Image (cartoon, helix red, strand yellow):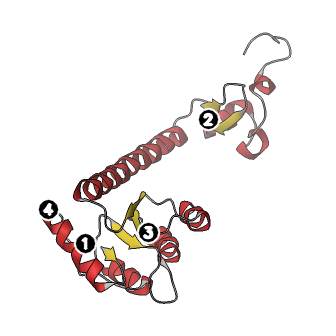
Amino acid sequence: LVVEDEAILAENLILRLHKLGYETLPYVSTGMQALDILSSNLVDLVLMDIRIKGELDGIDTALAMADKYPVPVVYLTSLTDEPTISRAKKTGAYGFIAKNSNLINLYTTIEMAIHRNRMEIQIKEKEELLSVTLKSISDAVVGSTLDGTIISWNKGAEDIFGYKLSEILGKNLSILTPSSLPNEM
């Protein structure tokens, strides 16, 4: 999906995307139109101009998309000032590309964004599977940092050690060492 309020730039970009083998929806020129399109279409990537018409600029649109539509966003911009970059970082954007970038830059940026998104989806699925697995086993599973700070604690650990997660989180593993065996960890 291309979100660009300058028709000539949007049409040129879509032609270039087609030349690279990508399918596109018709471009939209406002954030509200983008949100509307996303509500009824599966989209792999949004190429978003930062400065667009309407009440939402590109960054505000990306923020509004984040919870409802977890689609990667690559910003199209000629803006590289610090305040804009700082605002855009908060959206978790998958990249920035100049509006008139050459085909190689456009292609590599899109491919890397799509690849990163797929990897993040796989990681999230594996984390969810691991979380369900850890919750369902009765053995104690305790996660800690290298210095021994407890960062995770399953139901088995609660049952065996008698501490709830809220009581033990952030404490040192040494709290679990019996006083009769001070050198045992």
* Image mark for residue 126: none
Q: Please indicate whether residue 66 sits to the left or right of residue 81 in the image.
A: left
Q: Nearer the viewer, mark 4 or mark 1?
A: 1
Identity of the residue drawn at 38% across and 86% down: 33
Q: CA distance from mark 2 to mark 4?
A: 52 Å
Considering only order in the chain, which callout, 3 or 1, is on the residue closer to the N terminus? 1
Depth check, mark 1 against mark 3: the one in front is 3
Q: Earlier along the polypeptide chain: callout 2 or callout 1? A: 1
Quarter assignment of residue 148: top right
Distance from disc 4 to disc 1, alpha carbons, whole Å, reads: 12 Å
- The label on residue 13 is 1
Q: Which badge, 4 or 1, comes first in the chain's sequence? A: 1
User: Which quadrant is home to the C terminus?
Assistant: top right
Which residue was labeled with disc 2? 156
Residue drawn 62% across and 32% down?
143
- Which secondary structure lies at badge 4? loop
